[in-house]
Structures are given as structure tokens and as C-alpha cells.
Image (tube, rainbow, N blue to C red):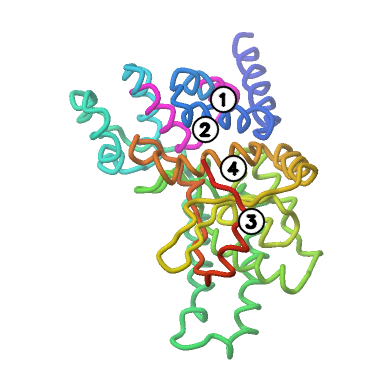
Amino acid sequence: MRRSCALLMLLMSVTLTAQVDYTQLYYPTVNRAELSIVEGDYENALQSFQTAFAAVHFSPSIDLYNAAVCALYLGEPATAKPLLIRILGRGVEPQYLWERLERFHPELVADWEALKAYPRVGIYEAESYRQEIYDMESLDQEFRNIEGTDEPYADTIAAIDRQNIRRFRELIAEHGFPGEQLFGAEKQILTTEFPGLIILRHYLQGLSRKQHPENDLMEILIRAVKAGQLEPNLMAQLLSLQGKTDLRLGGSGVWVFRSGSETSGYVVEKYPKEQLEKINEDRRQYGLDPLADYHRKAAFSLQKARERGFDFSKYSTTNKIALDRTAYDRILQSFESLR
């Protein structure tokens, strides 16, 4: 009887886990945690992170890391340690993690030898999947990396892209999206890139030009975000390559203009109220924060995050453009300073 009850509870747990929508239960809470970090309120940030972690079965390493840094600033190494252990268990190199933390939190020294000996948890059983994606990436690059121009191989490259994406779809349907949940983390990176990203980028860029709606990947990407397998900012950047949506994300969000020795500093585009409301509503449905909050995080990433030990690298991309003086003066009227 006890075994039957335990099995029922396990099945219920799996069912609930499968139904979790990260765009509703996870990302909005993490967005609040990150904004609290920008404001220097590490207590509220940590509370928000803990609420988010409790709502789902898997949390990305970058969020665990930022939560651990908050706990260390609050003088709570006992709270930080299990978060760091989870990151180490996913394959991040101990020395890489320690080098990021030692300058800010030397109190970890006494425990670090034990921490860094923590083994990678053996829950990632998709190595053949990962290797097949790496092989596909090599094929993707084979004709693109030929010295000189790749124009004579345009048809071959397009055929490889189509072949790769067909197989990629099959692999995703069979195993799930190829992110940290399946493969663990990279040895020296906490950001949200994943194996096969270059394949998707090249395919979506081609799709945007050739307008093949029957090969739309939007549903696959959105499903991955809802399952917590793909970070919303990265999804939106991929969708913008496909020309499907305009979420004002990634590198297009922050600009630096230069004319001679004069620079604009970090600036962002101005939007009419109605357009801004539409942008924010589109962002909300995918678990993204309002554009103004996104820009505040971008400013923090560019100016303060690294020096305080946090990882806001997903917000840090800028576009830097040199202009003549006339164009410089004219274009700045459409932008405002990023504070």
C-alpha cells in the first residue's frame, strides 16, 4: 500500500512538473530578483530567487549563481553553499567559479577545498545527442570557413542548413531542447547559450530572407521557453532573426554613437506611449520584463555587475556606430540616455 501511494505521489509530481509554465511561475519572479539586485536590495532579491526556485524543478545556473552572491553579501554562506554545489554538480569548473567569487567573498576560503571537490552529478545521459549536435555544427561551418568567399557554395550551405534543421527538429522532439537541463553547464560560462545555437541562427537568418513560413520554428522556441529549457531573451533574439516578432531585445537595445572624439554614452531608443505598451505586452507573455527594466539591467551589466560579482551578461550587448557630425546630432534626437 505504501509503495502504491509513493508511486501515485511520484506520478502526481511528474505531472505537475510537466505542466509548469516558466513564463508564468519562474521568469517574472527572477526578473524581480534581478531588478532588486540593480537597486542594491539583496535581501528582496534573494527572497525572490528562492520563491522562483521553489516553483520549478530546474533553475538555470546563472540564476543560482546570482542568488548565491546575494546570500554572500547578506552574510549567509550557509545559504550560498548549496546553490554553488548545484552549479558545480552541473560541470562548471571549480576554479572558474572561485575566481569569480574570491575577490568579493574571501570568507568562502575555509570551505572552498570541500566545495570544489564536489562531483558532477550524473543526471545528464544525452551525450550522444550532444555529440550529434557538435557534428552538425562542424558540418555547418565546413563550407562557411573556406578561405576567401563562400558564395560559390551558397547552394551547398543552404542544403546543409535544411538537412541540419530537419535533424535538429527530430532530436528536439525525441529528447527535448538541447540546453542546460539535458547537458549540464559549460565549464567556464554561466550564460544561456546552448549546443546548436549557431545552427539555429544560420537557419533562421536564411528563413528570414527566403520567407518559408512552412518551416517556422516559433512554436518550438516558445515551447522551450515555457518548459524552462530556453532563456526568454535568447528566444526573442532568435525570433527576431526569423522576422516573426519585434520584442526590442538583445544587441538592438543599447547603443553607443561616436563622432570624432565625442561619444553619446549608452543610449536607448525612444518610443511613443502606445508602441511601448504594445512592446511590453508582447514581452510579458513570454516571461520578459518591461523594456525600461530591461534597459536598467543593461546599464547595470555594462557599468556595475561584474565589479560587484554578479552575472548579468545576457543584458550586456551593445551596438557601437561611428557617424559624421550631422548624422550624430540628428540621430541622438531619437534616443535617450540609459541611466
Q: Which residues are magenta?
A: 50-72
Query: Residues under labels 1 and 3: Cα distance?
Result: 40 Å
Q: Which residue is mark 2?
A: 59
Amino acid type of the residue that numbered disc 2 sits on in the rendered structure: Ser
Query: Residues under labels 1 and 4: Cα distance?
Result: 15 Å
Q: Is residue 18 above or below residue 258?
A: above
The secondary structure type at the circle numbered 3 is: helix
Q: Is residue 110 above or below residue 338?
A: above
Which percent across, then down, holds residue 7?
Answer: 63, 19
For image coordinates 61% across by 33% down, the residue present is 27
Residue lying farthest to the top in this orientation: 1
Q: Which residue is mark 3?
A: 333
The secondary structure type at the circle numbered 2 is: loop
Which percent across, then down, holds residue 141?
Answer: 50, 74
> In the image, 74: left or right of 33?
left
Of callouts 1 and 4, the N-terminal one: 1
| C-beta proximity under 8 Å, tags 3 and 2 | no
Which is more toward the observer, 177 or 13?
Answer: 177
Q: Which residue is mark 4?
A: 229
Which percent across, then down, holds residue 328?
Answer: 56, 65
Amino acid type of the residue that numbered disc 3 sits on in the rendered structure: Gln
Of callouts 4 and 3, the N-terminal one: 4
For the residues carrying marks 3 and 2, which lies nearer the camera in this image? Answer: 3
